[in-house]
Image: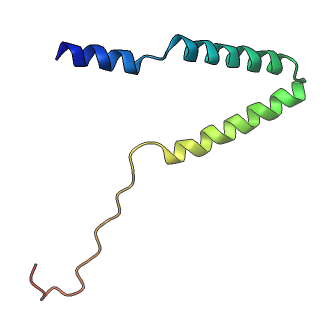
Amino acid sequence: MTEADDWARAEAAPSDEEIARIRRLIRRVTEEVDQLTDAERAEIQQAAAMVRKTRQGFLGMPRIPQPLPDLRPERPV
């Protein structure tokens, strides 16, 4: 069972290349955001706030509909 645990740990962890790619992406995005005007940043912040607000309505416990009433009570189960 220890071998399975080692395998699972190795597969679950991102590779060094994946980590490097994400770091390059973050660096690139940060540099581009630094070049934006204040108006452009405000527009992005508004859009992000709208997305967060919308997602709040979708996340959380799923809604479970009430069962439909039995329209034929004389029918055996």
Residue at (90, 24) in percent of width and height? 37
- Check the picture and name the quadrant holding the C terminus: bottom left
Name the one closer to the observer, 68 or 34. 34
Horizontal relation, residue 76 to residue 35: left or right: left
In the displayed orientation, state which residue is furthest to the left: 76
Name the one closer to the observer, 68 or 5. 5
Give the image location of residue 65, x and y in percent. Answer: 35, 63
The quarter holding residue 43 reads: top right
Q: How many marks?
A: 0
Coloured how?
A: rainbow
Horizontal relation, residue 74 to residue 15: left or right: left
Give the image location of residue 41, x and y in percent. Answer: 82, 27
Horizontal relation, residue 21 to residue 57: left or right: right
The quarter holding residue 34 reads: top right
Give the image location of residue 42, x and y in percent. Answer: 82, 30
In the displayed structure, would residue 61 be above or below residue 39? below
In the displayed structure, would residue 75 be above or below residue 15? below
- Check the picture and name the quadrant holding the N terminus: top left
In the displayed structure, would residue 22 be above or below residue 40? above
Give the image location of residue 32, x and y in percent. Answer: 82, 20
Horizontal relation, residue 30 to residue 20: left or right: right
In the displayed structure, would residue 53 be above or below residue 12? below
Residue at (75, 31) in percent of width and height? 45
